[in-house]
Image: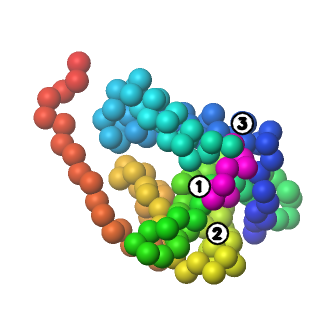
Amino acid sequence: MITLRPMTGDEFEGWSGRARDAYAEDVRVELGYTAEAAREKSRRDFASLLPDGVSSPGQTMLTAEDADSGELVGYLWFGVRDYGGQRIGFVWQVEVLEAARGRGYGRAIMTALEEQVTSRGIDRIDLNVFGGNNVARALYRSLGYRETHVGMTKQLFSES
């Protein structure tokens, strides 16, 4: 259904700004950061994880295309991390472009990710997903992922 290929430098430039902005918005909404603090966290996190852009060590940046039409349908960013004495694949971001949503591409990207990770001799994938992202959480559960930790918050006073 899809083909994954290495992200080009030009694609990275377009993707990274959009991804940083989306992450900042999620941090603001889901974690309660101010807009300025969320933008700063996003900037720091991306700079730390992707110091060399698309060529950053330990990170894999891929573009997803429809296998039949060649249509660009999304992006995948994952890396390999040492965690608890083992190497794991860690998904930093999966994006299905808005025009391609609802057509099974998210599932296809995650299935292709499993092939990418197992070809590297890794037998585990971890990821984080914000609690309010019900579509992604449902997809991950349907693919066999289980929740391992849950953060909760309660706003006591309304923000005016």
Q: Would residue 130 be seen by someone viewing this image from the given angle?
A: yes
Residue 94 marker:
1
Q: Badge 1 local density, few (<14 within 10 Å), some, or many (20+)?
A: some
Query: How far, Cα to Cα, is label 3 from label 2?
Result: 22 Å
Magenta stretch: includes residue 105: no
Q: Badge 2 local density, few (<14 within 10 Å), some, or many (20+)?
A: many
Q: Are marks 1 and 2 in contact (CB under 8 Å)?
A: yes
Magenta stretch: includes residue 57: yes
Q: Residue at x 53, y 73 (%)?
A: 87
Which residue is at the front of the view, 159 or 56?
A: 56
Image location of residue 130, percent across then percent down: 39, 51
Q: Residue furthest top?
A: 160
* Of the image marks 3 and 2, the number of the one nearer the N terminus: 3
Which residues lie in the magenta part? 53-60
Q: Residue at x 35, y 27 (%)?
A: 34
Residue 119 is drawn in which quadrant?
Answer: bottom right
Image location of residue 20, percent across then percent down: 56, 37
Residue 113 marker:
2
Give SS at disc 2: helix
Indicate the colouring scheme. Answer: rainbow
Which residue is at the front of the view, 20 or 72?
A: 20
Q: Residue at x 44, y 35 (%)?
A: 41
Q: Are marks 1 and 3 in contact (CB under 8 Å)?
A: no
Which residue is at the front of the view, 145 or 77?
A: 77
Image location of residue 53, percent across then percent down: 69, 43
Query: How far, Cα to Cα, is label 1 from label 2?
Result: 10 Å
Query: How far, Cα to Cα, is label 1 from label 3?
Result: 15 Å
Which corner quadrant holds the C terminus?
top left
Give SS at disc 3: helix
Q: Is residue 159 left or right of residue 119?
A: left
Which residue carries the number 3 mark?
14
